[in-house]
Amino acid sequence: MILQSAWIIAKKEIRLLFKSTRRILLLFTTPLILFLVFAITIIMAVAVISTIEEPVEKPIEIFVIQDDGEINGTSWGVQFYTLLKTNNLTKDLHYTNKNVTELDRLLESNNFSILLYIPANFSEIINSSLPTQFFIYYDNTEIDNIRVVNYIIEVSLILNQQILFHYHGITNINRIYSTLKRTSIDSVDSTITAAEGFAASFITLIPLYAIMLLVIPSLSLVLISVTIEREQKTLESLILQPIRRRSIIAGKLLYGSILVCFNTMFTVVTIIALIALGYFIIPSSIKIEIVPILESMIRNAPLSVWIFLLYIIIGLILVSLLTITGAVFFSLVAKDEREANMVISALIIIPLVLTLLVAFLPVEEIDSVIQTILMFLPLLGYLFAIHISLVTGEIVFSAWLSLLAQLAWILIGIWVASRLVESEGILEISYKHLFRIRRKD
Amino acid sequence: MGSIAITTDRLSKIYDINRKNEVQALKDLNLRIKKGEIYGLLGENGAGKTTTVRILTTMIKATSGTASIFGNDIVTDSSAVRKLVGCLPQDAGLYEEFSAVENLNFIAELRGLYDEEKKSQITALIEMVGLEDRKNDRVETYSGGMKRRLMIARAMIGEPQVLFLDEPTAGIDVLVSRRVREIIKNLAKQKNITVLLSTHDMISAERITDRVGVLHKGVLIAEDTPSRIIQKYARDLNDLEDAVVNLIGWTGEANEVSA
Ligand SMILES: Nc1ncnc2c1ncn2[C@@H]1O[C@H](COP(=O)(O)OP(=O)(O)OP(=O)(O)O)[C@@H](O)[C@H]1O
Ligand SMILES: [Mg+2]
């Protein structure tokens, strides 16, 4: 019964939507923005690429500083070096030996692609059955360097010793990626650097922008559809009909959900279309380099990455519903569109600002109880849970609870809105009156 | 004698103006309105006419007292009441971007009408209120009177047994006003629909109502056929307006109420 009238109301809203250019524009805001951004990016990329000459294939030069001495007639350092030169993965690389006296100068100048430093006590420590260390310094702005470093690590695993990484250049996505999958190779030093924490903070903001891009236009449309009933005085004739009054709420929610679905679908189609377009525009020399990297990233992504993606998607769905419910509730209370816009904008800005704060907060310093409480907040809690997951490298239990909390907030929102529409104050309500009517109920 | 369509029993309504002040908008209203009767509710601004209509159409709840429409209690059987009742609220509006047909379509679907039945009712209603040649234009291009006529049509979708019309002729020219009167009269006489009409238009009240009730500050102070009300209360002029003016006393007292 409720669903049937809800569908009639949602259908009416969709018909009304197409009666106004302003609302149609709102509906297509996200794809339009995306289209513009992508178009500009592609034009710029093409402009830049066309000025670059075809790169000359230049082998990466690996500087090796072998400072290890012999202990009992064997040098593990030499053995490691030999291993590198004979292993299938690394034997074709281009090695240049450097003297240990040059180490400081090289490190200071950063004038190298990859530098492998095997320290003086390497063998000595291994012989006393302790894990020893060697050092890899590299420029991580070059994707090729990262690939080669990964080869070296793989070969060094045979020795089962600890590696200390140092890189210069920018933090790149590959590092965040390995933080996320919590690289299980014991020998890799996986403590989070400040730069990585910073990157995690930026990633936390991505779902926030996804929410804004996908939900805000729908939110505005739902807001209009609710406040217009009051402004055009059609609410009265609506509640006069032989339908349950809460089906008005259901109808608006249904309309909002349809809008979000449509918007998401349209955005995805736009993105796919633009990627396809980009695929044809980008020169093949670059394609050859990028495609295998993407392929291997997808193929080698551990389960935890997929679970994390699933977590984000479920969360986005819940948060969209939550936002729509909030829009229905807060515009139901408002006396006109202006008032609703004011209140809802304020409510959207709060999580936005707080997320910026939370995302750059040193998480270790927040008490775990407060962390859990933060995760239970509507909207903000979900973003915070993502942030925690990125920083700790796993989806903690309370992060799943955070999703449940979002669901709970949706149900609370629907319940309160239904109570509101069924109370007789609904015809006269405004933010000024809200408190009085709640008190009377 | 036909059956009773509308019954109210000591119906009262008290509004909270703010935390301290209250207004008694309706006090111990007892009505018995027969099926097929056209009943006019008269009274000064703020007398409680709209409040009565809103309570009887289940829009708001009475503070005390009971009422029923064809035996269905307005509180406990509100959904049955809403099916039986059509209403033109005093301060109603239409979806401005929809045409007349689209506006009626939406309400018809909410009332469970589909396909042929829906179409034929809408066509008949649009013809009845004389909007055929504008029926596919957006309502925002209509004049105030055309909108009012469309709202009357909207109130009658789903063939309600009881019609509540809160000032149907407000802002309507004399020609249309006469036409609306005819529409209401025909409904009552031909389809045996009960009409409760609140109005300040004394000519309408005098010509088409079977009985009128005069509300003053929420109290029903007189109830009879228009001719007998005129007989009893008219002094200077022999019409309903004069009678009502004398009845509610156009004195400082009444000014207080409207202020
Ligand atoms: N929502 C409300 N809140 C508080 N008081 C109200 C409300 N609605 C009506 N009133 C008060 O109730 C009384 C009756 O109002 P009502 O609207 O029923 O009068 P009316 O007879 O329809 O008047 P009019 O001819 O002006 O339409 C008035 O004093 C009014 O101030
Ligand atoms: Mg009134």
Image: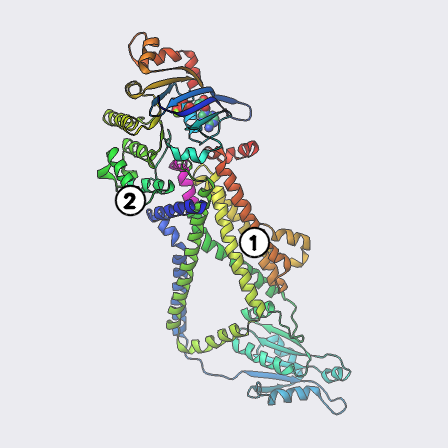
Residue A1 position by quadrant: top left
- On screen, residue A207 versus residue B57, left or right, reads right
Q: Which quadrant is home to the N terminus of chain B?
A: top left
- On screen, residue B171 versus residue A33, left or right, reads left
Front position in the image: A354 or A435 = A435
The magenta segment = A223-238
Residue A338 position by quadrant: top left
Residue A131 rendering spot, x and y as whole percentages: 73, 79
In the image, farthest residue toward the top: B235
Give residue A355's mark. 1
Residue A382 magenta: no
Q: Which element type, helix, strand or loop, lies under badge 1?
A: helix
Main SS of residues in magenta: helix
Residue at image point 61% right, 86% down: A84
Residue A231 magenta: yes
Residue A227 position by quadrant: top left
Name the residue that disc number 2 marks: B116
Q: Chain of mark 1?
A: A
Q: CA distance from mark 2 to mark 1?
A: 55 Å
- Quadrant for ligand 2 reads top left
Residue A34 rendering spot, x and y as whole percentages: 41, 60
Front position in the image: A404 or B195 = B195
Q: Chain of mark 2?
A: B
In the image, farthest residue toward the front: B1
Type of amino acid under label 2: Glu
In the image, residue B52 sits, relative to residue A216, either above or below, namely above
